[in-house]
Amino acid sequence: MSKILRLDSQQDGFADKLNALLSREADTGVDVQSLVAGILADVKTRGNAALCEYTERFDGWACTGETIEITPERMLAAWNNVSEMDRDSLQLAADRIRAYHEHQTQDDWEYTDDIGMTLGQRITPLDRVGLYVPGGKAAYPSSVLMNAVPAQVAGVEEIVMVVPTPGGEINELVLAAAHVSGVQRGFAVGGAQAVAALAYGTETIPAVDKIVGPGNKFVAAAKRQVFGTCGIDMIAGPSEIVVVADGGNPSWIAADFLSQAEHDEAAQSILVSTDKHLLDQVAASIEAHLAVLPRAEIARASVETHGALIHVADWAEAADVVNVIAPEHLELALENPDDILPAIRHAGAIFIGHFVPEALGDYIAGPNHVLPTNRTARFSSPLGVYDFQKRSSLIRATRAAVEKIGPAAAHLAHREGLQAHALTLELRLKKPR
């Protein structure tokens, strides 16, 4: 049987044990940060030469500035080469993702206040964004859709994709997804060196305004270090899921529990229930699934190192546990999920009811699957149209309006010791001190 941690909220030291469970190492310590800093500096200085040296070292193929580019024609060819079912599924997913994200668009606005000053906000898209698409242990065409479609809805002028290609092999489904979701340029590079290329630019890869998309610990460290040179979406850690269940099919719940565990040995799966018998049933079903899943070795390492089955006294306590965890994915596999939903404050995406597995959201439901991890759902949101836009404040004022509020502004400027600030107002008011 799998050695999955069992916790009970009624036992002494539960809070400490839960915190210890959640304290997964991000694995971006000094050694990783130092290695990444060297790669970033090298690519910034030497451009394509450094980029291709690291690609040969880490991905195992010799590239040049010319051979790393993936043209729109190559993406179209991939679209034509994949199966009809592949195309239909990708198109359906892209359409649903676009429809959802179109609800996130914002409009410019202005209002005139009681002194005659007109204030407002202007929304403008970023000029160029870079999508990092993971390509190590698995290929993720869904990640292309989830990053590119919202950028396209936001009005981004140029969407650039980088994707690792171990051994020089390019995944056709990833390229097909790039075609259907509006990617204009692609490059067959990954890792920290690809992040450096997007942030600083090389002879081939243009510098971007923002880098989005998940990656391994080296990619996460690189995104952290280039922030400020360009924007980033978030520092994504290993995937995670919390399932809150009151019954239902133990085999379904076990499969949902394993859905994130198969991503990565560092992923985390947690089941919360008031029913100890259900926890036992699900544990047995987890073992049954692990006996046949192709990625069982990865999933087993994940659940035995980071997983947990948690018994709670009632649903109020379940909500408290969820809010402490602040999970990336939360499934409410409950007969009456709306009874607990109002108490949930921190979660990246919430899947409501027995018939809504997390995988539905990963691919085709419509909301974004790029979500805050490692408890950052306490202060972060899913990727969306708003991540590809910026806001500018608008201020219009008549002389009469400035005469009403300008003296207070000048006074505050003097109080801060910024006399030139005050002078800009006093000259207009013709009342210099």
Image: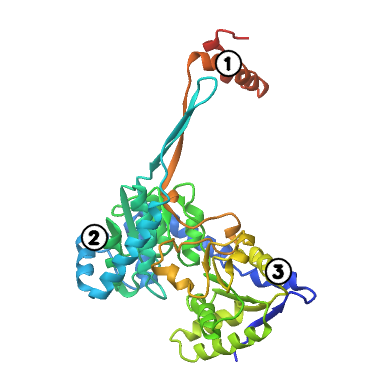
In front: label 1 or label 3: 3
Disc 1/disc 2 C-alpha distance (Å): 62 Å
- Mark 1, Cα crowd under 10 Å, few <14 / some 14-19 / many 20+, is few
* SS at circle 1: helix
* SS at circle 3: helix
In front: label 3 or label 2: 3
Name the residue at 51% across, 60% down.
221
Q: Position of residue 41 (x, y in %)?
A: 44, 54
Nearest the camera: 390 or 201? 390
- Answer above or below: position of 263 versus 289: above
Q: Amino acid at mark 3?
A: Glu
Which residue does the numbered mark 3 point to in the structure image? Answer: 317
Q: Position of residue 284 (x, y in %)?
A: 58, 90
Disc 3/disc 2 C-alpha distance (Å): 58 Å
Q: Give the left or right position of residue 175, taking residue 142 as reference.
A: left
Disc 1/disc 3 C-alpha distance (Å): 54 Å
Q: Amino acid at mark 1?
A: Lys
Name the residue at 44% across, 42% down.
390
Q: Amino acid at mark 2?
A: Glu
Which residue does the numbered mark 2 point to in the structure image? Answer: 66
**Considering the image in quadrants, where does the N terminus appear?**
bottom right
- Ranked by sequence position, the earlier of labels 1 and 3 is 3
Q: Where residue 404 is drawn, which disc sits there?
A: 1
In front: label 1 or label 2: 1
Q: Position of residue 214 (x, y in %)?
A: 45, 63
- Ranked by sequence position, the earlier of labels 3 and 2 is 2
Q: Are marks 1 and 2 in contact (CB under 8 Å)?
A: no
